[in-house]
């Protein structure tokens, strides 16, 4: 059995970068990402604890309903391309340089 691409060194870096990007935002997902980055939570805690607002859960359920409403051929096409898509997403996230840019001092002219 092949290891999940998220469990490789590149996948772990991609997950970290994904959390950093989420943490820069606002809302319940940003709060959760900050908790994970601070070591107060693990990514899998999202499955077991109530971190998400009703609004976020409604949006997720709407996405699930949209998926089920797709014709079978469209769902199968999405599944057929899923592995390549995940690997591309991991590569793109892992390649990000998320170091905080240095802010140049302002000139006092």
Image (tube, rainbow, N blue to C red):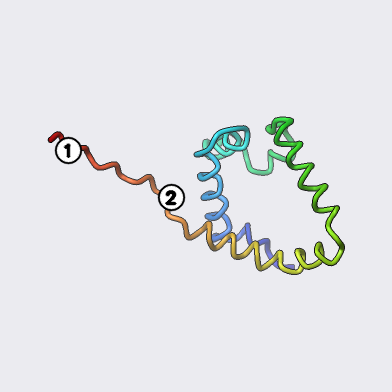
> Can you say whether 19 is above or below 89 in the image?
above
Q: x%, y% of residue 66? A: 80, 50
Q: x%, y% of residue 35? A: 57, 34
Pick the quarter of the image with the C terminus: top left
Q: Which mark is residue 107?
A: 1
What residue is shown at x 62% (from left), y 65% (from top)? 87
Instruction: Look at the numbered discs 1 and 2 and tell me whether their residues touch, using CB distance below 8 Å.
Output: no
The answer to which of marks 1 and 2 sits earlier in the sequence is: 2
Q: x%, y% of residue 21? A: 52, 45
Which is nearer the eye, 8 or 86?
Answer: 86
Is residue 37 left or right of 97 when viewed as pictured? Answer: right
Q: Nearer the viewer, mark 1 or mark 2?
A: 1
Snapshot quadrant of residue 55: top right
Q: Which mark is residue 98?
A: 2
Is residue 66 left or right of 7 when viewed as pictured? Answer: right
Tag 2, which secondary structure? loop
Q: Which mark is residue 7?
A: none
What residue is shown at x 66% (from left), y 68% (from top)? 84
**How crowded is the residue under tag 1: few (<14 C-alpha within 10 Å), some, or many (20+)?**
few
Tag 1, which secondary structure? loop
What residue is shown at x 55% (from left), y 55% (from top)? 14
Which is nearer the eye, 12 or 51?
Answer: 51
Number of numbered discs on residues: 2
Which is nearer the eye, 40 or 76?
Answer: 76
Pick the quarter of the image with the N terminus: bottom right
Snapshot quadrant of residue 100: top left
């Amino acid at each position: 059995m092949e290891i999940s691409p998220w469990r490789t060194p590149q996948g772990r870096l991609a997950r970290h970068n994904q959390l950093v990007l989420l943490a820069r935002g606002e809302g319940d997902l940003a709060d959760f990402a900050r908790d994970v980055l601070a070591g107060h939570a693990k990514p899998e805690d999202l499955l077991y604890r109530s971190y998400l607002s009703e609004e976020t859960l409604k949006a997720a359920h709407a996405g699930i309903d949209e998926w089920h409403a797709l014709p079978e051929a469209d769902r199968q096409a999405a599944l057929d391309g899923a592995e390549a898509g995940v690997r591309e997403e991991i590569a793109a996230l892992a390649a990000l340089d998320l170091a905080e840019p240095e802010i140049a001092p302002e000139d006092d002219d």
